[in-house]
């Protein structure tokens, strides 16, 4: 499996499974959104039609993880609204 790190040109190879990696990452900072993707939630800035955009990279949100992702987004939007009245994640019709 390849792991892509921000600011690195090369990926890191590991023999760990996604499940093993997911268990080792802090739940408060990382979220599994697809069978093949775990994302750093602090890096999410654009969500469009059940896809997360990181610059030119598109990460799909699989139906299996959609409920947990929607719950995370709802909590983040409520939290940001309470804190400063602004939301950092923009969403274009997540349910389309």
Image (cartoon, grey):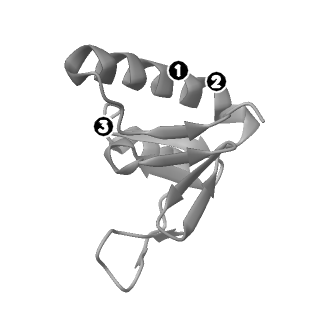
List the residue tagged with mark 2: 67
Q: Quadrant of the C terminus?
A: top right
Q: Residue at coordinates 48% horizontally, 20% vertically from top-left?
A: 74
Quarter-wise, where is residue 11 in the image?
bottom left
Q: Can see residue 31?
A: yes
- Is mark 2 in CB contact (under 8 Å) with mark 1? yes
In x, y percent, where is residue 48?
Answer: 62, 46
The disc label shown at residue 71, or none: 1
Q: Is residue 10 above or below residue 68?
A: below
* Quarter where residue 29 is shown: top left
Front-most of residues 89 and 28: 89
Residue at point 39%, 85% (across, down): 10
Q: CA distance from mark 1 to mark 3?
A: 17 Å
Specify whether residue 17 is in view.
no
Secondary structure, mark 2, is: helix
Q: Earlier in the sequence, mark 1 or mark 3?
A: 3
Mark 3: few/some/many CA within 10 Å (<14, 14-19, 20+): few
**Image position, residue 94 (x, y; %):** 66, 34
Q: What numbered label is drawn on residue 26?
A: 3
Instruction: Mark 3 vs mark 2: give the one in front.
Output: 2
Q: Residues within 10 Å of mark 2 (few under 14, many from 20)?
A: few
Residue 93's disc number:
none
Q: Secondary structure at mark 3?
A: loop
Q: Are marks 1 and 3 in contact (CB under 8 Å)?
A: no
Which residue is outermost to the left? 83
């Amino acid at each position: 499996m390849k792991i892509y790190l921000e600011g690195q040109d090369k990926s890191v190879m590991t023999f760990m499974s996604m499940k093993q990696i997911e268990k080792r990452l802090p739940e408060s900072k990382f979220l599994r959104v697809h069978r093949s993707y775990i994302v750093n939630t602090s890096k999410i800035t654009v969500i469009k039609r059940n896809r997360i955009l990181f610059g030119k990279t598109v990460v799909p949100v699989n139906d299996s993880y959609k409920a947990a992702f929607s719950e995370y987004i709802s909590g983040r939007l409520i939290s940001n609204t309470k804190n400063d009245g602004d939301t950092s994640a923009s969403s274009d019709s997540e349910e389309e």
